[in-house]
Image: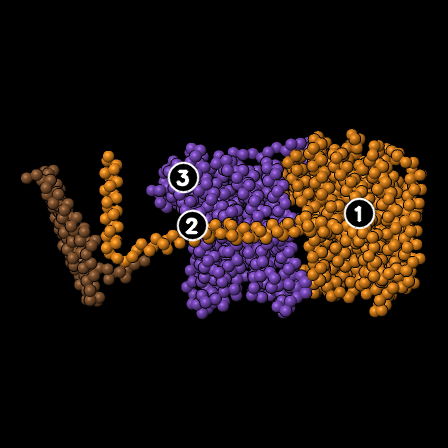
Amino acid sequence: MSTYLAAAEPATAEATGVLALGWLLIALPLLGAAVLLLGGRRTDRWGHLFGTAMPALACLIALAQFAALLERDAEERSVGSHLFSWIPVGALEVEVGLLLDPLSMCFVLLVTFVGTLIHVYSIGYMAHDPDRRRFFGYLNLFVAAMLLLVLADSFLVLYVGWEGVGLASYLLIGFWSYNPTYAAAAKKAFVANRVGDFGLSVAVLIMFAQFGGVSFSEVFAGAEGASEGVLTVLGLMLLLAACGKSAQFPLQSWLGDAMAGPTPVSALIHAATMVTAGVYLVVRSAPVFEGAPDAQLVVVIVGAVTLLFGAAIGCAKDDIKKALAASTMSQIGYMMLAAGLGPVGYAFAIFHLLTHGFFKAGLFLGAGSVMHGMGDQVNMRRFGGLSSVMKVTWVTFAFGWLAIIGFPGLSGFWSKDKIIEAAYVGDGWRPWVFGTAALVGAGITAFYMTRLFVMTFHGKRRWTDDVHPHESPLVMTVPLMVLAVGSALLGLALGPTGAIAHWLEPVVGAHGEEEPVIAVTLLTTLTVVLVLAGAALAWLTYERRPVATTAPRGSWLTRAARRDLYQDTVNESLLMHPGAWLTRSLVFFDNRGVDGTVNGLAALLGGTSARLRRLQTGFVRSYALSMFAGAAVVVGAMLLVRL
Amino acid sequence: MNPMNYVYLSAVLFSIGAAGVLLRRNAIVVFMCVELMLNACNLAFVTFSRMEGNLDGQVIAFFVMVVAAAEVVVGLAIIVTIVRTRRSASVDGANLLKY
Amino acid sequence: MTDFPWLTTLGLVPLVGALVVAALPSARELLAKQVALGFSLVVLAGTIALALQFDSDGGEQFQFAETYEWIPQFGVSYALGVDGIALVLIAMATVLTPVCILASWHDVDSDRRSAKGYFALLLLLEMFMIGVFAATDVFLFYVLFEAMLVPMYFIIGSYGGAQRSYAAVKFLLYSLVGGLLMLAAVIGLYVTSDGGPKAFLFENLLGTEMGTGTERLLFLGFFIAFAIKAPLWPLHTWLPDAAAESPPGGAVLLVGVLDKVGTFGMIRFCLPLFPDASQWATPAVITLSVIGILYGALLAIGQTDMKRLIAYTSISHFGFIVLGIFAMTSQGQAGATLYMVNHGFSTAALFLIAGFLISRRGSRLIRDYGGVQRVAPMLAGTFLVAGLSSLALPGLSSFVSEILVLIGTYSRYEVAAVIATGGIILASLYILLMYQRTMTGEPTEHTSQMADLNTREAWVVAPLIAIIIALGFFPKPLLDVINPAVDRTMEQVGVTDPEPAQPAAEGARP
């Protein structure tokens, strides 16, 4: 514990040279977004090229920074640069500063590199869309916000990026918002994210009240002396935020609907980068979670539940993008589980995040390429046999598929296997429950991904008559090839060499060699056997036998999984319907109750005066009588008082 | 003679005037009854002045007389106008000035 | 500091403008509009000059102070002066007035009343707004507070929508009830004060000795008047009517500036003049404001009328402002003051863009729209930015103030702050539901011919959006001005910020 905390606060040096250009990483895509969105139709002709150049330039800077960091000693790889004072009020002094350390470097490289590839891909994918310029503007906005998120050196600046990516996600899911369903999906994503943001807001409030600051260094230093109760609440709030952003249980329902966005968006935002921000948050907040074992346990549970949840949904979906979305949810569940395990898992969470960023982006772009060729169809029951007409897509997709199921040697194998091992570390009931969940999840992953692959590329052609599948243009297939190479080799380069663990050590700390409760070799064999079994089962079911073009009724589990295990039903009946009822009754109350009281008071005054008015009859003698009566009362009163 | 008798007379006169104001409809009669009430008050003032031995009550009686004279001028003018326009001196008939 | 009477001049310019505009012949509408715009721009330039001379670290509480005897027999003086809080609010008012004049260019053309009257009233209102924020004499403040109702009453009642007379009378009566209570409290304050020819001066009233009961009654007199103005739940029902019925420019000044007088009054008068009573009332006020935050947001979700929806969002936002003021922390109060400014701009943008939308279609009902994004992308885009500012998206101005209020509140009242934070979820619902229903989908037959923003409208929206974004990323200039004023208020109330429970070591500060 103590060694860990010492490792968690490496001395942050002031950035110099190329490392001081961190602001440019954010400014370039932001400039792109501003030019494209404000420039209007004038920029239509070259907007996509400009929009692609910005993240590409950022990627070059990131690579230079990476090289500069590599030259330094491990302890000196954390550099900060202070930009300007943002919110100075009393004891609260929020500075906008950037922190470039090995952890954020990983993300910067992932975001700029994969982001650039996806920009390139989008040039082809969105070629026929009249609003392509706007699309690139939004994508650039996303890249800028995502980089701000990972480069921020305080929780409040992180928050800006955090909601910024949420905004970009909202805009991009609703890019074709003239379709009402897509507009609703965009709103749903934003609101679900806002529920998570509630957690982040409260976490920021707690941080200032407890530690007197919201920067990473202040919070982590304060966390050392804080009570476990405070840290547990803080951890749970951060977890809530992470659940919203990373589509973890119970805030996962938006991710499936988010597939309404154009496919490059699904690849970049809803697979490779934004949805993994939750994992980043948990790993970044390691010192908080280290002091709160209960919160960590909840993180692990959330991760385990989500990984099985997503896997179950993935098995039943016929929509290729929604099946991939379910798989994303499940894979992030793995990362979350690893992040909750503590120092033994942090590095692997990030490792899996990186490899997943490559192979899942490749899979999504591959799916986009298929859709491109199939006239925007997404129903896998209408695919089949595409391997012969879309050779490049098929081969690159195969790499992604093998990587995600953890085929020995490919990226996913190295990263996922490590998570399963880590989940089996510990004592008591936990390793058995969580390890087994991860292990079973690997088997299911193999099943549904093979199902997806086979239904799309193999078996009989089940195309509708009006489609004429063709291979996508080079501008789309080149990014696919690059990502396929990454899917194949990234794991090998980083995993067995220990490079990733070593690289991240200054941030997340080292951990000793702890043995899983099952021997490692046995565990690896078990995993591979399960994976092969799952893949074989899917192969037999969907390759050997014909696939129905309309979905069969299926078992109750299939039906439940098709409806996302009733998560929308639950949300609707628990939150939306009571909420709508509450709103309606409050509107009624405001009109009749609050305003009614006021108007009633006015009516009462008016009515009373209308009645009292009637006393003025116009008859002189009745006035005289009332005067006499009044005089008599006055005299009587005076007499009484004297008595 | 006991000066209190004047006070009793004044009270009787006032009551007669008041009853007349309340009960009669003819504007002229009502007007006369108002005058009767004013003069009943004058009588009371003068009596009290005598009883108390100072001149305050007599001074006020003169004031009342002046006011009454002025009132007669205005009041009679109004009554005459009402009679001219409505062909009637009934006070109950002239009830247009209401709510 | 010069002896030039800056504030009086600043107030006289719009008055002269109003008179000139009113004196122009009715037929020359265009000239009247141009003159009105010109005068409001002169005021804006004057305010900028004022702000540049303002010394944020000055020793005096009020700068540019002017004091003349007015009714010395009753201790009334004509006294003006600004501190940081007043300065930023005056700046907001003087920025919004030309924007509103430009936005209202054609709003009253078809009205049966002359267009020049409307612009003259707007300028008159600007004079009162400057005066009320600058007044440092409690009696003068009261007079301006009440006089401000007059132009607003005529703006709503003469140039408003179908229900205008109901709305105008409701607005007037509500405000008069508050004003009456405040008048009683003002008199009471004079009686308890030391008297003398300058008894009503703010600095002479500070620290007046009074009994606990008296203090509480006087506090309530002021507070209820301000709570009606603000408006605080449950005294809010005049606002949706008044804002929905008044023309867009009037609605902006009503919700954006006039209502701020309520919250400004709380922080300027209620807290420093009645420190003990303020602390006594704090739990109740915090409860009311938290209820207001959620209540306003929920009601906004349930509205079918665009302008009423925006009015209800303002009730929610005013809940945040009052919460920040009564949290009695420097973050809370600075956040609340900043919130007043930011809310002014973002609500102005929302109201004006909604007004542009309404002027194209002629209906305030949300269900009459749809698909506007396809035909008028600029209109939809700016509306979204204004909405996002209203839901406090980080990077836009409202976020800074909202998080400051919440941070300031949490360090004293955890539960209230956490419940209020729930408002951010509801905020995303009411804004995005409105956006979804009006802007997305396929254009309907009524919206398919809708024109995008024209040049004039773009010039109205551009400065607002620019301010919203600029203040979101760099609020420091405003905070630098506000902070000393807030610190002084805290000092006058006699409260200090709570210490963090587990402060990080000094070395950990960046």
Which of label 2 and label 3 is nearer to you? 2
Residue C377 location, x and y as percent?
A: 66, 63
Q: From mark 2 to mark 3, how far is it between C-alphas?
A: 19 Å
Most extreme residue toward the left is: B1
Q: Tag 1: Cα neighbours inside 10 Å, few (<14), some, or many (≥20)?
A: many
Chain A tint as drawn:
orange
Q: From mark 1 to mark 2, how far is it between C-alphas?
A: 60 Å
Find residue C189 and name its label. Answer: 3
- If you read the primary sequence from the N terminus, does the residue marked by circle 2 or circle 3 appear first? 2
Residue matched to label 2: C176
The one of A432 and A372 positioned closer to us in this rendering: A432
Badges 1 and 3, same chain: no
- Chain under numbered label 3: C
Chain B tint as drawn:
brown
Residue at x-position 16% and y-position 53%: B33
Find residue A309 and name its label. Answer: 1
Badges 2 and 3, same chain: yes
- Chain under numbered label 1: A
Chain C tint as drawn:
purple
Q: Secondary structure at mark 1?
A: helix
Residue at x-position 91% and y-position 43%: A527
Q: Secondary structure at mark 3?
A: helix
